[in-house]
Image (tube, grey):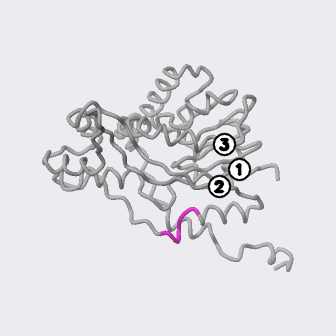
Amino acid sequence: MDPKREREMPVINWRALQSLAAPARPAPPAPGVGARENIWDRSADMYREMAAMERAFTLPQLDVLPVGPEDTVLDIGCGPGRIAVPMAQRARSVTAIDTSEKMLAHCRANAQAAGAKNLDARLLDWLEAVPGENLAVHDVAIGCRSVGLSDLEKLSAFARKTAVVIAFANAPSIPEILGELFDGATERPPFQPPAQDRRLGYNVMFNIVYDLGYEPNLRIFPDGFTADFPDREAAYARLLPLSPVPVTDLARFRANADRCLTQNPDGTVTFLRETRSFVMWWDTRR
């Protein structure tokens, strides 16, 4: 091997480590089964509600990113538009891609409600995206808790200026939080997320980006899900549909929810479940 090439090779194979932490991707629809019948369609309503409860925590995460009014933004695996919609209010345009038509429908509806007319929500599998062929290169490319995090070199190739990744920072994810909320309240566990390993957290992605030759920036943010309700019954009614599995023990569900509910002096109730997220970005021109 060329000695110079050997010196340039990473000391640690961070990509191999990332594959150990990456959850298995859901299988594609069977032949003859439309894309509308995939697993993400079934969970789209839940993610829409969770994104709405996370909005107050989302905006500070986006404030650190170098995105201006002349920039174009690509959101990979956009879901209901948690990132895409506020980005459309800051950038010249946003292209939001997802493999779920129902997620895209929520994204379009949220964009319309926010008055964001510069958002193009498209049905496209990121694994099939090719720069300059079926998907244009944008100024900023974002992978947030999506398949966009699986290949940071490809993510960089779609970013003319800045590539961004956002995910939970060694802290409870949405499946874990909902697992707590519905623990013991259903006949079978509605969520079984893989156990987290701190050794395979955001440090792995940071080092992958570094080994690609970029200088990554990293910030850790408090995150969470919160909403105000007139009373506890209203809170239960809003939270109950988040489970895709029928709830058979309402008393257990209410006891679980009560751990995240606070009674306010005016009689209203606040739901709050805190977690943490990281935002990492790097200049692809360097």
Q: Is the magenta stretch mostly helix, strand or loop?
A: helix
Task: Classify 208 as above or below 186.
Answer: below
> What secondary structure is marked by label 1?
helix
Task: Tell me the residue at 24%/33% (across/down).
Answer: 231
- Contact (CB < 8 A) between labels 1 and 3? yes
The amino acid on which the numbered mark 1 sits, given as a three-letter code, is Ser
Q: Disc 3 residue type?
A: Ala
From this viewpoint, is residue 33 visible?
Answer: no
Q: Which mark is residue 156?
A: 1
Disc 1 and disc 2 in contact, CB within 8 angstroms: yes
Which picture quadrant has residue 234? top left
Q: In which quarter of the image is residue 211?
A: bottom right
Q: Could you say which disc has been placed on residue 152 in the image?
A: 2
Give the left or right position of residue 115, taking residue 255 as reference.
right
Which residue type does callout 2 highlight?
A: Leu
Which residue corresponds to mark 3?
A: 141
Q: Residues within 10 Å of mark 2 (few under 14, many from 20)?
A: some
Tell me which segment is drawn in magenta: 198-202
**Image coords of residue 71 (percent x, y):** 73, 33
Q: Where is residue 80 in the image (x, y as percent from the top left)?
A: 46, 34
